[in-house]
Image (cartoon, coloured by chain):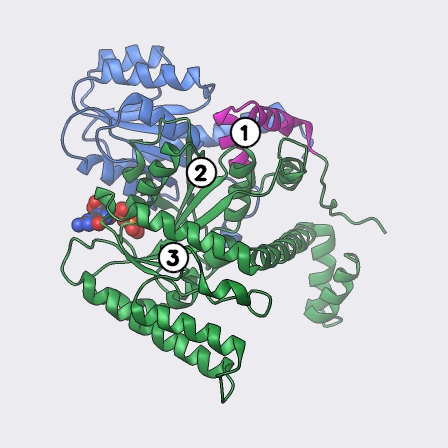
Chain colours: A green, B blue
């Protein structure tokens, strides 16, 4: 039986070859247009990604770093991204920025305004900035955001920063695509409480209290630390056996607890990390540091970058980076398959020679949606 | 209808850069246009005030927009529009529509048209005019592209 749906092709269509060549020769328009092909899932986009991601085909080495910056509207995320990008560029890095804003559910349009803060950088060849609309995805990221980052990575912008608006439960996807998640909060509007409700506490690797030039910043810092302390307390209860004097994991968890109580991030500024000796037994836990910044003035940005670097080192040493990347890869394969199956179902049903008789059979009472679906799905295996 | 059925894979949203070059002070007009475009279903990249032609073109390229819409009230339209058009062409983006609005005398509109700039809208014209213009331009270009690629898909 011949399926009317073409298979997931990994062979690059000739029409997309110039984009691949353009990207390899550093052409920014080619990169921008390749991103559009991916974002719009145009014919051949999977083959394009396959080609770009194949080792030796223009890509060498491990993936670059990916830092997610999320938080409520207006918290200063774009200002912070700009300051971080500038520091990276000055250190000689090539920076990619992806800024995701929500699509209007009414019109399907979107107003993407994150570049307003980034204009001064936009003409610099060391940076590539792309705005994306979420296009109906509920997870805060557009479906193709990770893939767009992949394209920027292989195109020579491996230092990736992704900004998303975090307002509710919808922000968790960023944790699935970033190595390090920075949650940005501001003193006004009871952000601390909001963050806990919204699940931002769970995904944050680093907290930033931005707009620390405003009143209430210190109080918010304390609130977050208290919340983290309670959470770590719960975790300790679960992990530590009754007499924890001889239990290694208990000792480690406790050390984490002490670091929180002291109010500083783990291993910040300490050369010899106490937990290292215990690595073979269990990785020391990471306690999200709570930092203060004044983003538009660049204050605290160096500290933030240092904390991100600490987190990266911790992830490498603890095996967390590998674990996250493996989880990401699994999700990735699943997403590609999900998307492809969905596409096939749609195309199959759009074919009137298939849909017509099937719907007719249901209308005449000979079939149900279930028997029809079962029969159509047989063609997919 | 969920948004996925509104926009199936492979279909493209119109992407528009709304830019406000030059030194004049407020961006109310540009914001009104940006919101109108969003409500028309376009994806609008808004870059704020005081943009140089270089910034506008850098943003247009990176964002791969279909259209650049510039609001020019300063009277510098005879330098700004040709400059942006030239930089776009230089970057290889000859197929991006450059349009816009402002207080632009008819003679100048004609002169700019001759230089490859698209339709320009006066300060009084309703935003729906610009929306309709961009939509029909976009559809025409997509049709032309499909024809150019042949019936392979
Ligand atoms: N006082 C003060 N204002 C700041 C600070 N950081 C950013 N701002 C201002 O806050 C406003 C919003 O900043 P953005 O960087 O656009 O915030 P954002 O979180 O990216 O906003 P959205 O993307 O719209 O959610 C701007 O007017 C900034 O100048 C800060 O540390 N202190
Ligand atoms: Mg922003």
Q: Position of residue A362 (x, y in %)?
A: 70, 68
Magenta segment boundaries in residue numbering: A12-37
Q: Assess disc 1: are there few (<14), some (14-19) or many (≥20) residues with their C-alpha within 10 Å of its C-alpha.
A: few
State yes or no: discs 2 and 1 in contact (Cβ < 8 Å). Answer: no
The mark closer to the camera, 3 or 1, is: 3
The Cα–Cα distance between marks 3 and 1, rounded to whole angstroms, is 63 Å
Relative to A86, does residue A161 appear above or below in the rendering?
Answer: below
Which residue is disc 1 drawn over? B143
Q: Is residue A269 left or right of residue A48?
A: left
The Cα–Cα distance between marks 3 and 2, rounded to whole angstroms, is 31 Å
The Cα–Cα distance between marks 2 and 1, rounded to whole angstroms, is 33 Å
State yes or no: discs 3 and 1 in contact (Cβ < 8 Å). Answer: no
Q: Position of residue A162 (x, y in %)?
A: 42, 47
Q: Residue A180 or B3: which is nearer the viewer?
A: A180
Magenta segment includes A126: no
Determine the residue positioned at 23% across, 18% down.
B77
What is the number of the mark on residue A270?
3
Helix or strand or loop: what does disc 2 sit on? strand
Q: Residue B89 or A376: which is nearer the viewer?
A: B89
Q: Is residue A323 left or right of residue A348?
A: left
Q: Dominant secondary structure of the magenta stretch? A: helix
Which residue is disc 2 drawn over? A96
Helix or strand or loop: what does disc 1 sit on? helix
Q: Position of residue B22 (x, y in %)?
A: 20, 24
Q: Which chain does the residue under circle 2 lie in?
A: A
What is the number of the mark on residue A11?
none
- The residue at label 2 has a CB less than 8 Å from ligand 2: no
- Location of the C terminus of chain A (image quadrant): bottom right
**Residue B2 can be seen in this image:** no
Q: Which chain does the residue under circle 3 lie in?
A: A
């Amino acid at each position: 039986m011949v399926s009317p749906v073409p298979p997931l092709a990994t062979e690059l269509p000739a029409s997309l070859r110039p984009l691949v060549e353009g990207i390899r020769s550093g052409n920014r328009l080619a990169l921008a247009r390749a991103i559009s092909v991916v974002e719009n899932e145009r014919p051949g986009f999977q083959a394009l990604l396959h080609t770009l991601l194949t080792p030796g085909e223009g890509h060498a080495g491990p993936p670059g770093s990916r830092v997610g910056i999320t938080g409520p509207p207006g918290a200063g995320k774009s200002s912070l991204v700009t300051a971080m990008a500038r520091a990276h560029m000055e250190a000689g890095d090539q920076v990619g920025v992806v800024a995701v804003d929500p699509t209007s559910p009414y019109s399907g349009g979107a107003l993407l305004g994150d570049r307003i803060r980034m204009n001064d950088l936009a003409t610099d060849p060391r940076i590539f900035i792309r705005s994306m609309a979420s296009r109906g995805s509920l997870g805060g990221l557009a479906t193709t955001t990770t893939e767009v980052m992949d394209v920027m990575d292989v195109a020579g912008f491996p230092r990736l920063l992704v900004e998303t608006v975090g307002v509710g439960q919808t922000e968790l996807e960023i944790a699935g695509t970033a190595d390090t998640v920075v949650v940005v909060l501001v003193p006004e509007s009871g952000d601390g409480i909001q963050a806990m409700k919204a699940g931002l506490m769970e995904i944050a690797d680093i907290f930033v209290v931005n707009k620390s030039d405003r009143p209430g910043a210190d109080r918010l810092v304390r609130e977050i630390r208290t919340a983290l302390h309670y959470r770590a307390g719960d975790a300790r209860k679960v992990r530590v056996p009754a007499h924890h004097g001889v239990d290694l994991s208990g000792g480690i968890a406790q050390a984490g607890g002490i670091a929180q109580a002291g109010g500083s991030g783990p291993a910040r500024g300490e050369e010899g990390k106490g937990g290292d000796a215990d690595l073979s037994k269990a990785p020391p836990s990471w306690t999200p540091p709570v930092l203060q910044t004044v983003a538009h003035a660049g204050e605290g940005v160096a500290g933030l970058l240092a904390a991100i670097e600490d987190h990266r080192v911790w992830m490498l040493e603890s095996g967390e980076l590998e674990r996250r990347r493996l989880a990401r890869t699994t999700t990735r394969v699943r997403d590609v398959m999900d998307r492809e199956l969905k596409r096939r179902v749609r195309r199959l049903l759009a074919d009137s020679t298939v849909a017509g008789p099937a719907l007719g059979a249901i209308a005449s009472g000979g079939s149900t949606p279930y028997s029809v679906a079962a029969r159509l799905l047989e063609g997919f295996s | 209808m969920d948004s996925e059925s509104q926009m199936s894979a492979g279909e493209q949203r119109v992407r528009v850069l709304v830019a406000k070059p030059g030194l004049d002070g407020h961006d109310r007009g540009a914001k009104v246009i940006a919101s109108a475009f969003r409500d028309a279903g376009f994806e609008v990249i808004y870059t704020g005030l005081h943009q140089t032609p270089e910034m506008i073109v850098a943003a247009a390229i990176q964002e791969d927009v279909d259209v650049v819409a510039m609001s020019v009230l300063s009277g510098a339209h005879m330098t700004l529009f040709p400059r942006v058009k030239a930089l776009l062409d230089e970057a290889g983006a000859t197929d991006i529509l450059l349009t816009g609005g402002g207080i632009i005398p008819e003679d100048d509109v004609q002169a700019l048209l001759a230089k490859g700039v698209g339709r320009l809208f006066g300060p009084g014209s309703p935003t729906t005019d610009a929306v309709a213009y961009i939509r029909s331009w976009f559809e025409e270009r997509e049709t032309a592209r499909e024809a150019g690629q042949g019936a392979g898909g």
